[in-house]
Amino acid sequence: MSEVVYSADIRIDRIKGTFRHAWLPAHEGPVEFGVHGAIKEHYGVEPERDITTTLDYVIAATGG
């Protein structure tokens, strides 16, 4: 097995309900995660405001 060449130091803080902060390397300040659109409908939640989901970031990263 090869040696590990990178390990991300990431922290996730649950703020309230579906609202979370992610602390990512090389990013100043927290990244906000929450729910919006079909995701909030699926889970039956109504957040205070619509926020990008973790799924949105995964899809963007896959395309990038």
Image (cartoon, rainbow, N blue to C red):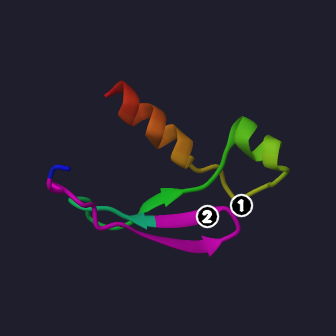
Q: Residue at x 53, y 48 (%)?
A: 54
In the image: residue 43, left or right of residue 11: right
Foreground of the two, 8 or 26: 8
Q: Position of residue 18 (x, y in %)?
A: 67, 62
Disc ID at residue 8: none
Q: Position of residue 21 (x, y in %)?
A: 48, 67
In which quarter of the view is residue 64 placed? top left
Q: Is residue 43 magenta?
A: no
Q: Tell me, yes or no, whether the two marked residues, 1 and 2, touch with CB atoms within 8 Å.
A: yes
Q: Quadrant of residue 34?
A: bottom right
Residue 23 in the figure: left or right of residue 14: left
Judging by the rendered image, the residue that carries numbered circle 1 is: 48
Secondary structure under tag 2 reads strand
- Asked if residue 14 is among those painted magenta in the image, a careful observer would answer yes
Would you name the residue on which mark 2 appears?
19
Badge 1 or badge 2: first in the primary sequence: 2
Q: Amino acid at mark 2?
A: Phe
Q: Residue furthest front?
A: 1
